[in-house]
Amino acid sequence: MTASRQVVIVGSGPAGLTAAIYTARAQLLPLVIEGEPSSTSDQPGGQLMLTTEVENYPGFVDGIMGPELMGAFRAQAERFGAEYVSAKVSKVDLSTRPFRIWVGDPSAPEPAYETAGLVIATGARSLMLGLPGEERLIGHGVSTCATCDGFFFRDLDIAVVGGGDSAIEEALFLTRFARSVTLVHRRGELRASKVMQQRAFANPKLVFRWNSVVTEILGEAKVTGVVLRDTQTEAVSTLDVSGLFVAIGHEPNTGLFADQLELEAGGYIRTFGGTRTSVEGVFACGDVQDRTYQQAITAAGSGCMAALDVERWLESSAATHLMGAGRE
Ligand code: NAP
């Protein structure tokens, strides 16, 4: 049987859970479809579930573990009445009102939920190299976030993979902590913008390994090095590093919505003046609509905005509905 809700939130990272806290406190009884445990995390909760210590989330003087922070967000929303379902959304229909949401079998005739307002907070995932051991060593030397993890590599040698703006930005940031940063790029020239390139070339701590790909990550419990292959000479070499930052791009989790919402280049959901999307009543927050900042705190901030936006929209659409009813 289809359950009816006023607000459904899809996603349970900082954006989704902040939207849950605010909509729950507004007594909208939000339902959070939080996702499922994955191969990299036994709990849903987004990218912070893959992080160890978070030191830049305001309010935690001594830092906090990523999963612990997400657990606190979750419990806080629950305290105000948010409900959770541990499942993945398999299909949505945004062409009808209320919106229809399937979990499990997408060919089932009836959706599991229908909702007046929808908040999308499905986040983004870092593209990975796909090497054996890569997932296992996330948080143990493999990282996708220099801002989150750079501090732990003080005076150590590390490598960054990628040649775009993200890779250069990460590499430059990491030179503040590391003894050396080797940028491993598969071609002989960078994709990054000229200004970023100039900064990179001017930094004495940054070493370039051109035309090189990582073929193996070394280390059992933590990263001890990487094996590189020169794409021109086929020469194989080992680079002793304690950290490997993968910065080869991000992919927003928008597959479910691709043909129903307006997207921007790169697949991010297009938002208009806050968190409104191209479909009235559907709001997007966090990394799924943000290719620029991608921080827990900015995701949480936009989750708050989405909650306020959906609350106001529900109020105004109820008012419109009542006015319409009064005229008949
Ligand atoms: P990107 O521009 O797509 O660059 C990805 C880089 O990773 C490219 O150099 C690519 O190599 C390399 N790469 C991709 N797949 C790879 C693989 N399997 N193995 C090895 N290398 C691989 O992504 P991005 O750097 O994340 O930037 C995304 C967008 O955000 C861009 O528009 C960028 O300008 C913007 N951005 C801007 C700033 C800033 O202005 N401060 C900061 C970050 C991002 P190839 O070059 O050979 O394709």
Image (cartoon, rainbow, N blue to C red):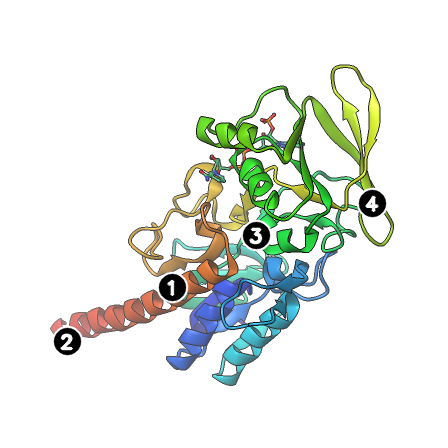
Residue 89, relative to residue 240: is it above or below? below
Mark 3 beta carbon near ligand 1 (under 8 Å):
no
Measured Cα–Cα span from mark 4 to mark 3: 21 Å
Q: Where residue 138 sits: x, y (%)?
A: 73, 52
Q: Which numbered disc, 4 or 3, marks the residue that appears first in the sequence? A: 3
Q: Where is residue 50 in the image (x, y as percent from the top left)?
A: 67, 58
Observer-side mark, 1 or 4, equals: 4
From mark 1 to mark 4, how far is it between C-alphas? Answer: 43 Å
- For mark 1, what is the residue? 306
Residue picked out by circle 2 = 326
Q: Spatial distance from mark 3 to mark 1, Cα to Cα?
A: 25 Å
Mark 2 secondary-structure assignment: helix
At a point 48% along the width and 32% down the height, the residue shown is: 196
> Please, is residue 264 above or below residue 232 in the view?
below
- Please give the residue where the numbered disc 3 appears in the rendered image: 147
Question: Relative to 214, is 116 above or below?
Answer: below
Q: Which amino acid does label 3 sit on?
A: Thr
Look at 52% across and 50% down and name the residue there: 256
**Mark 1 surroundings within 10 Å by alpha-carbon count, few (fewer than 14), some (14 through 19), many (20 or more):** many
- Are the residues flagged by discs 2 and 1 in contact, CB closer than 8 Å? no
Write the residue at 58% across / 66% down. Answer: 34
Residue at the disc numbered 4: 224
Badges 4 and 3: C-beta atoms under 8 Å apart? no
* Circle 1: element type: helix
Residue type at tag 1 = Ala
* Secondary structure type for disc 3: helix
Q: How far apart are marks 3 and 2 (CA)?
A: 55 Å
Label pair 3/1, CB-CB below 8 angstroms: no
Nearest the camera: 72 or 122?
A: 72
Residue found at x 38% / y 64%: 306
Which of the 4 quarters of the picture holds residue 284? bottom left
